[in-house]
Image (tube, rainbow, N blue to C red):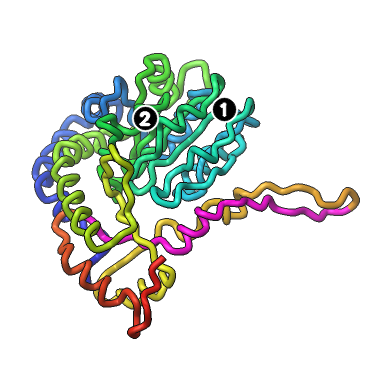
């Protein structure tokens, strides 16, 4: 069976180098406060002036919003079609999340639906699957009181007209979870920015800022070493992914990319009306996944409640109206895409099982 993900081809060229780095870290007993080299490397890769390493993508989201002034009662506008950490970070800060629906082609925030008011502290677009949000349009919607922070957790190497995502807003956050484009030796993340004052605040807050409450969000040195090596070889990984995507695009018609966007293909999405049966039919030959079949607005933890009766305890939940999010989450299928993959075999298996039992195609 073809697995959904196989890191062997990615790790093969750097394994010996990394083991030497580990031995050196053990010899020196040097485990924290040594992430500068990776931060410089990643800042150069993205074109940002500053990079601040942290211990996870979730920490990056929390810290970036906190350092930009998000506090209880503030409103942060984002999407529901994302991994839950995007919205969890807002809730942990005591702020209020507001959902905007996604574009039906790119699966990213639809800027035409943005409603920015005086209470909107942050717009938090998510560059989903490695595709890019329409950042110029989103920036045009912001007010003088609103900050744009980009969630680039799935978009390592994604650019718009040559400019890396995460450099359009005030800050960009990244996850280096092992399965991401550039994956760490465990959990890690970072924040990029061109704002010197913000970078200084992020660095102080991530490690128990003096005379403040602070956070323990430091990146471990072993992850910084591993990530520097992964970054060195990442252009080859991107090249291989884009070559596979180019082949997929000839046979699978659901991964739309706006002109000027360089997609990084963290995930290659397709759509199918009978998704669960497609996954089942392919199961013995090809592992497929879903990202994400339960959008955040269907999680009761992120619902708002209001009293429906003055004299009793009856409550009702907020009814979020996100029709495109619901449509995509009910039909999206993630197809394997990684170096060393037999792309022709993947397409053959999908085509063989697409309709099932000789029935007409259930394509959206």
The part of the image, by quadrant, that contains residue 118 is top right
Which residue is located at x 40 percent, y 57 percent?
291
Mark 1 touching mark 2, by CB under 8 A?
Answer: no
Which residue is located at x 36 percent, y 63 percent?
289
| As drawn, 103 above or below 59 | below
Q: CA distance from mark 1 to mark 2?
A: 18 Å
Give SS at disc 1: strand
Q: Identify which residue, 12 or 345, lies in the foreground.
A: 345
| Residue occupying the far right of the picture | 311
The residue that disc 1 covers is 121
In this picture, which residue range is highlighted in magenta? 312-337
Give SS at disc 2: strand
Task: State yes or no: residue 293 in magenta.
Answer: no
Q: Position of residue 344 (x, y in %)?
A: 16, 66
Residue 278 visible somewhere in the drawing: yes
In front: mark 1 or mark 2?
Answer: 1
Which residue is located at x 48 percent, y 35 percent?
124
The residue that disc 2 covers is 191
The part of the image, by quadrant, that contains residue 189 is top left
The part of the image, by quadrant, that contains residue 161 is top left
Q: Which quarter shows the N terminus? A: bottom left
Q: Position of residue 361 (x, y in %)?
A: 36, 75
Which residue is located at x 25 percent, y 31 percent?
162
Residue 215 visible somewhere in the drawing: no
Mark toward the start of the polypeptide (1 vs 2): 1
Q: Position of residue 107 (x, y in %)?
A: 42, 49
The crowding category of the residue bearing disc 2, from other C-alpha atoms within 10 Å (few below 14, some 14 to 19, many at least 20), is many
| As drawn, 87 above or below 273 | above
Q: Position of residue 312 (x, y in %)?
A: 87, 54
- Residue 149 marker: none
């Amino acid at each position: 069976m073809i697995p959904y993900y196989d890191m062997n081809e990615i790790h093969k060229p750097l394994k010996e180098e990394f083991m030497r780095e580990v031995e050196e870290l053990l010899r020196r007993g040097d485990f924290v406060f040594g992430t500068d080299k990776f931060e410089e490397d990643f800042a150069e890769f993205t074109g940002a002036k500053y990079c601040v390493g942290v211990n996870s993508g979730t920490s990056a989201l929390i810290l970036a919003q906190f350092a930009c002034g998000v506090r209880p009662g503030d409103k942060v506008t984002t999407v529901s079609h994302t991994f839950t950490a995007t919205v969890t970070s807002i809730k942990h800060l005591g702020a209020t999340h507001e959902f905007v629906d996604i574009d039906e082609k790119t699966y990213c925030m639809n800027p035409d639906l943005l409603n920015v008011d005086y209470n909107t502290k942050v717009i938090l677009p998510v560059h989903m699957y490695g595709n890019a949000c329409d950042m110029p349009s989103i920036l045009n919607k912001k007010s003088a009181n609103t900050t744009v922070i980009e969630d680039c957790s799935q978009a390592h190497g994604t650019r718009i007209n040559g400019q890396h995502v995460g450099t359009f807003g005030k800050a960009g956050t990244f996850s280096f979870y092992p399965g991401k484009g550039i994956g760490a030796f465990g959990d890690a993340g970072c924040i990029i920015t061109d704002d010197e004052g913000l970078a200084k605040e992020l660095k102080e807050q991530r490690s128990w800022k003096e005379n403040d409450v602070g956070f323990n969000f430091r990146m471990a040195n072993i992850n910084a070493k591993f990530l520097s090596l992964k970054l060195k070889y990442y252009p080859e990984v991107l090249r291989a992914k884009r070559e596979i995507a180019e082949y997929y695009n000839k046979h699978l018609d659901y991964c739309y990319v706006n002109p000027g966007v360089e997609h990084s293909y963290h995930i290659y999405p397709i759509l199918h009306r009978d998704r669960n049966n497609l996954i089942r039919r392919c199961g013995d030959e090809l592992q497929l996944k879903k990202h994400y079949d339960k959008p955040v607005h269907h999680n009761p933890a992120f619902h708002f409640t209001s009293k429906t009766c003055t004299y009793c305890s009856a409550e009702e939940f907020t009814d979020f109206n996100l029709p495109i999010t619901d449509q995509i989450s009910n039909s999206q299928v993630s197809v394997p895409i990684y170096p060393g993959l037999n792309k022709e075999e993947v397409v053959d298996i999908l085509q063989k099982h697409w309709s099932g039992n000789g029935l007409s195609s259930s394509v959206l």
